[in-house]
Image (tube, rainbow, N blue to C red):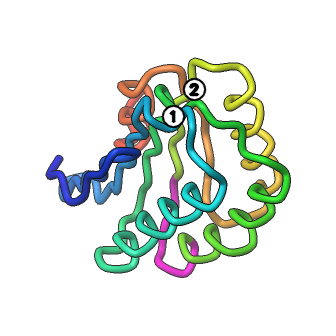
């Protein structure tokens, strides 16, 4: 994977072989403001639009923010349609180690279950990548 963006909250990588845009959240998300989270998601979608992938992998292992119901709605109505419009077919999520962020991530995906994107949550990144590649 080739690194295409990095700041204090996230790193983005692109894998040409699997057509995967990968987002890795850092430990600095502990004190992330809601507005900053939205800005970070907008960074992600800008890169997604510049080089549309078939797959996205979002690694929440270090993510320590609960996504509020308002942010969940924002993601589902504003961000996820951009993913679909750009041809994303699979969304692999690597689970957060924190309970409340994990619950909020699952709620967000539940809100978006009727989309054209196949969302799956994994405990390990290796499992997520194998699923993206179509391996077991």
- Residue under label 2, please give it: 96
- Is the C-beta separation of discs 1 and 2 under 8 Å? yes
Q: Secondary structure at mark 2?
A: loop
Q: Which mark is residue 104?
A: none
Magenta highlight range: 84-90
Q: What numbered label is drawn on residue 60?
A: 1
Instruction: Please provide percent x and percent y for residue 107.
Output: 80, 42
Q: Secondary structure at mark 1?
A: loop
In the rendered image, which quarter is residue 72 located in? bottom right
**What residue is at 58 percent from the left and 30 percent from the top?**
64
Spatial separation of the CA atoms under disc 1 and disc 2: 5 Å
Q: x, y percentage for residue 1?
A: 17, 47
Q: Position of residue 93 (x, y in %)?
A: 54, 39
In this rendering, position of residue 24 left or right of residue 105: left
Reading the chain from its start, which is encountered first: label 1 or label 2? 1
Q: Residue at x 69, y 40 (%)?
A: 105
Residue at horizontal 51%, vertical 38%?
29
Snapshot quadrant of residue 97: top right
Q: Position of residue 22 (x, y in %)?
A: 35, 49
Question: Residue at horizontal 61%, vertical 39%?
Answer: 120
């Amino acid at each position: 994977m080739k690194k295409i963006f990095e700041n204090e909250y996230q790193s983005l990588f692109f894998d040409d072989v699997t057509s995967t845009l990968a987002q890795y959240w850092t430990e600095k998300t502990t004190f992330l403001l809601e507005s900053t989270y939205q800005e970070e998601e907008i960074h992600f979608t800008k890169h997604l639009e510049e080089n549309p992938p078939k797959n996205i992998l979002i690694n929440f292992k270090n993510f320590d923010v609960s996504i509020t119901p308002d942010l969940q709605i924002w993601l589902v109505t504003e961000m996820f349609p951009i993913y679909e419009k750009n041809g994303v077919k699979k969304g692999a999520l690597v689970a957060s180690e924190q309970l409340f962020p994990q619950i909020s991530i699952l709620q967000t995906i539940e809100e978006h279950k009727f989309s054209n994107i196949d969302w799956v949550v994994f405990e390990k990144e290796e499992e997520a990548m194998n699923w993206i590649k179509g391996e077991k």
